[in-house]
Image: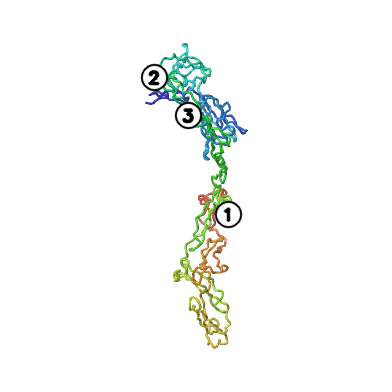
Amino acid sequence: QSIGCDDYLGSDKVIDKCGICGGDNTACKVVSGVFKHTLTNLGYHKIVEIPEGATKINITEMSKSNNYLALRSRSGRSIINGNWAIDRPGRYEGGGTMFTYRRPNEISSTAGESFLADGPTNEVLDVYMIHQQPNPGIHYEYIIPGDNVISPQLLAHRRPGEPFNGQLGMPESTSHEDEDLHRETDILTGQSAGTFPVIQPGRFPSHQPENQVPAVQPPRQNREHNWKQVGKTECTTTCGKGSQYPIFHCVNRITHEEVPEGYCDSSTKPIPEEEACNLFPCPAFWDIGEWSECSKTCGLGMQHRQILCRQIYANRTLTVQQYRCQHLEKPDTTSTCQLKICSEWQIRTEWTSCSVPCGVGQRTRDVKCVSNLGDIVDDEECNMKLRPNDIENCDMGPCAKSWFLTEWSDRCSAECGDGIRTRSVVCMTNHISSLPLEGCGNNRPSETTPCNNGPCTGKVEWFAGGWTQCSTECGSGTQQREVICVRKTEGNFDVLNPYECSYLEKPPSQQSCYLKPCGSKWFHTEWSTCSKSCEGGFRVREVRCLSDDMAASTQCDPQLKPGEKEPCNTQDCVPEIDENCKDKYYNCNVVVQARLCVYTYYKTACCASCSRVANRQPGFLGRR
């Protein structure tokens, strides 16, 4: 079986909202309201008075603000947020009850501050607001006993037979209400019931007077046992003034041996009285408040918190001079904060393909600074240190099968008429000389190109053929060539007897050659495809310095190095007309004015209008 609030087994009594065991909620009154006055002066402003005996106290700010609630007693003692010192949220004792002070600090929270207490209070308390910005409204609510309710503290500490307000008993001529009171009082004091009987208004005060008439005690009986103090309870605190109570046991009057309490008269058992203990103050400590909201909603800001030197004494936390905490390192009172970046970088396109099929090239992507509304803004509005790269190198791997070429020779092979100019062509594999040539395929670039130094006059001259390869790959060797006497006619050469050219100095048909060391040369690949089809792109090629044996070398003249990158396709872009790109709505000009073309839906629904804007404003939607 369950136990009711009257401590009887099987009782179904419960405490009502008035704190009455078995009550019907009619013995108390709920006081509530909202303080909405407009205040002009900064500082403390009184909101509401909480009377003595109030319970279920709730003082709540209706929305978050920079104002603070404060609480103090009628005697002027500050309980919470007094003397312009803001206390941290927590539990604070005052007015005979414990107040819970809450101050939500979450940025997303809109709840305001609040004081909550179960009560009852034993003195009048005043609630204030520290006004700093417009009042959002303060809701207050508490419960007070009705006019015919007796204080529970008053009855709970009476002994059987103890006078009430100086009176020993109830007169015989009392009314039925007085008889009920007398009977209920006996039950309350003997069984610790929690009910508060109804009495005539003004019959009893809310507390016992100091000049109370001593209770009439029954004649002392000559008993063998009596009550004896055998010790004290443990102190409630280790420092800062706690409390403890004496412990009484029933003992034999002669032997002082403890016996069961039933041997002693329970009505004569002394009531333990509170005694102070551990009066020395607790060590001071830094009381760290909550961080304030960041001073900026985006970008780098500051936040603050209050650091107070506090000391606990008599169940109260007091603010003391800071030198008392000098043995402790003081925490920081300010800190930087950054909730988000005001405008953020957005990557609008994926990386393009690498500009070269092999080797090291470049690739690009579109990076824009976009505001919170989706508008493209100047790059300066975003944090440049956080800007993603919009161009980077890309390595497509070694050009395992690429032709490397030298520049064409400067001199034509013929002084007049048709001749040729030559260049060197090498197939490179994995950055080293790796022949055979078929490794690069069949599309071997030509090593010769025609040249013409103008028509010949038909004179007789020696014609020299091309030199054969050097007889050795390195060092001194010889080269051969054919030298014949010819006469150039229109469109043809007539071969003559060498005698006809005897009066001319005959070119040598043999010469020495020396291939190594003959220095190093610059080689390069073909140009890559242009990175853009219009409005100026770039193309790249790979350039290497190779020695005679086609090995990488550092001996080439840097001033003669061919360019690795050059501009291309510098002509203006011509918009491509798309027959399917039409406006589906008549008011697409509003979409353009509202700068909504950055969104896919509006770009499609108002294709023609958005495209015209994109062509007028480079970078707005991207250019072809």
Q: Is mark 2 on a helix, strand or loop?
A: helix
Determine the residue positioned at 55% across, 87% down. 500
Q: What residue type is labelled 2?
A: Tyr
Q: Which mark is residue 167?
A: none
Answer yes or no: is residue 306 visible.
no
Rounded to the nearest angstrom, the CA distance separating label 2 from label 1 is 104 Å
- In the rendered image, the quadrant that contains the N terminus is top left
Check the image and name the residue furthest to the bottom. Answer: 499
- Above or below — where is 553 with respect to 2? below
Name the N-terminal-most of marks 2 and 1: 2
| Residue 309 position within the rendered picture, expressed as x and y whole percent measured from the top left | 56, 36
Q: Nearer the viewer, residue 331 or 568?
A: 331
Q: Mark 2 points at which residue?
A: 263
Q: Mark 1 points at which residue?
A: 617
- Above or below — where is 493 with respect to 562? below
The colouring scheme, among rainbow, by chain, secondary structure or one colour, is rainbow
Q: Nearer the viewer, mark 3 or mark 1?
A: 3
User: Would you call the spot at circle 2 few (<14 residues within 10 Å), some (14-19), or many (20 or more)?
Assistant: some
- Above or below — where is 559 with respect to 108? below
Q: Nearer the viewer, mark 2 or mark 1?
A: 2
Q: Where, by quadrant of the figure, is residue 320 drawn?
A: top right
Q: Which amino acid does label 3 sit on?
A: Cys
Q: Is mark 1 on a helix, strand or loop?
A: loop
Rounded to the nearest angstrom, the CA distance separating label 3 from label 1 is 81 Å
Q: Name the residue under label 3.
A: 235
